[in-house]
Image (cartoon, rainbow, N blue to C red):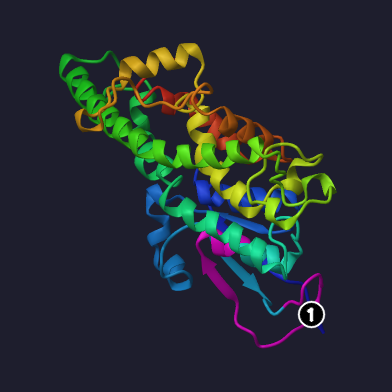
Amino acid sequence: MTATPSLTVFGHYISQPSRAVLWALAMTRTPFQFVKMDPTKGECESAQFLQKFPAGVIPALEVLHPAVPLHTTTVAVETVPPLRITESSAILKYLALTRGWEDWYPPGDLEQQARIDSWLHWNNSNTRLATTAVFRHLLRNMDLGMATTSTGGAVTASEEEVIRARRAKVASTVSAGLVQLLDPLKVLEGELSARAATARLSGLHAGRRQVDKSSRGPLVTGEGSSPSRDLSLADIAIYCELDQLERVGLLFPSADDLSGWQSALKPPPESNHVSTPIATTTDFPFLRQWMTAVSAAPEHDAVRASMFKLAPVLKGVLLPGR
């Protein structure tokens, strides 16, 4: 008797690490079941979820019949307990190695795996700040962008005072978070610009052109013929942290958005910034090129539909009427 391996992803499309996993599965057309979990409603703290995933975080992956050899579709039914893991980097690496995503995480190439692992770990305490220090504060206060009041009618003077105070607090927090994020963005810009300067191809396979191992890296520059092929797991993870800020105009903003954010956000005194620390295309041209290349990968808009829908509301937290 045989059984087909079964994947179940617990997550939410507004969660950046969840989107990374869901996007990888969508691009590879890997069958899976999806269980929507809303952490803002305490669903990750339910006894049922914690019994399976004691860490209480998303994304989480449950694999039935996990003892599956690479590239196989069926295995003998055995009394093997389900595999249950959390943390998007661990999930992505497991899926890559067991589902044959060789372009994104090459099996047997320890040197290339180490490069990708390095960026995955770096992301957790660097570009992850795009969420923990910036985006999360817009999400937690998105009622400010919904143009609603406690009574459903005109805003009273007392309500307006509360709204102004809340917006001032969020603006201060977001501005401080953007200052923290600038250093990781400079690291990425330096990495990508150095590769361009030395004419190195940074995709894993660069459109199947032959390149020396020393010139391969985990970040793409858009030179390959197939964006999804030239990605690595690190590209997917890092991009999902940054694209949300681009969507609300805090990264590579239009002239109109830049003007609005500069009025709404004031850099903290201790940062020594004379203007709002928003990353523009002029400041980070190679990073912008990289993000454009990654965004060309399949299923990009489908996976981000929920975030796209929320973007105007999140922008309205500090830029009402936009």
Horizontal and vertical percent for residue 207?
A: 82, 45
Horizontal and vertical percent for residue 169?
A: 23, 30
User: For the magenta stretch, what is the residue range?
Assistant: 68-92
The residue under label 1 is 75
Binning the other alpha carbons within 10 Å of mark 1 as few (below 14), some (14 to 19) or many (20 upward) gives some
Q: Is residue 321 visible?
A: no
**Residue 244 located left or right of residue 110:** left
Q: Does the magenta-highlighted stretch encompass residue 204? A: no
**Does residue 2 lie above or below 159 as drawn?**
below
Horizontal and vertical percent for residue 125?
A: 41, 52
Q: Quadrant of residue 321?
A: top left
Q: Residue at x 60, y 57 (%)?
A: 116
Q: Residue at x 66, y 58 (%)?
A: 33
Q: Is residue 206 visible?
A: yes
Q: Quadrant of residue 66?
A: bottom right
**Residue 3 located left or right of residue 186:** right
